[in-house]
Image (cartoon, rainbow, N blue to C red):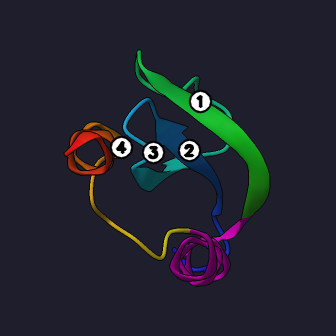
Amino acid sequence: MESELFRVVVNAEEQHSIWPVGPEPPAGWHDTGVSGTRPECLDRIAEMWTDITPLSVRRARAER
């Protein structure tokens, strides 16, 4: 439902997702403080998550 509220969550690899407001996100995922409707959260993720490469891969590349 479009009016249902979600929040943007992120994991240790800096991957972003949405999770319903209310229940705690799964282990390993943390709230970013951004919430809204599904489209609003997805738009915010598009703004925040510009490099979808996992953090561990970016670090490995930087070490080369």
Which numbered disc flags the more N-terminal residue, 4 or 3?
Answer: 3
Q: Residues within 10 Å of mark 2 (few under 14, many from 20)?
A: many
Assess whether mark 3 and mark 4 are in contact (beta carbons under 8 angstroms). Answer: yes
Q: Which mark is residue 9?
A: 2
Which numbered disc flags the more N-terminal residue, 4 or 1?
Answer: 1
**Residue 20 on the magenta span:** no
Q: What residue sits 19% from the left and 46% below the top? A: 64
Q: Residues within 10 Å of mark 1 (few under 14, many from 20)?
A: some
Which numbered disc flags the more N-terminal residue, 2 or 3?
Answer: 2
Residue 48 lies left or right of residue 53; in this view the side is: right
Residue type at mark 1: give it: His
Assess whether mark 1 and mark 2 are in contact (beta carbons under 8 angstroms). Answer: yes
Residue 34 lies left or right of residue 39; in this view the side is: right
Q: Position of residue 58 (x, y in %)?
A: 30, 50
Residue type at mark 3: give it: Glu
Q: Which residue is mark 1?
A: 30
Q: What residue sits 51% from the left and 42% below the top? A: 10
Assess whether mark 4 and mark 2 are in contact (beta carbons under 8 angstroms). Answer: no
Q: Is residue 5 above or below residue 57?
A: below
Magenta-highlighted residues: 36-48
The secondary structure type at the circle numbered 3 is loop
What's the distance in space between the residues labelled 4 and 1, CA to CA?
A: 15 Å
Q: Position of residue 31 (x, y in %)?
A: 67, 36
**Residue 37 on the magenta span:** yes
* Mark 3 or 1, closer to the camera: 3
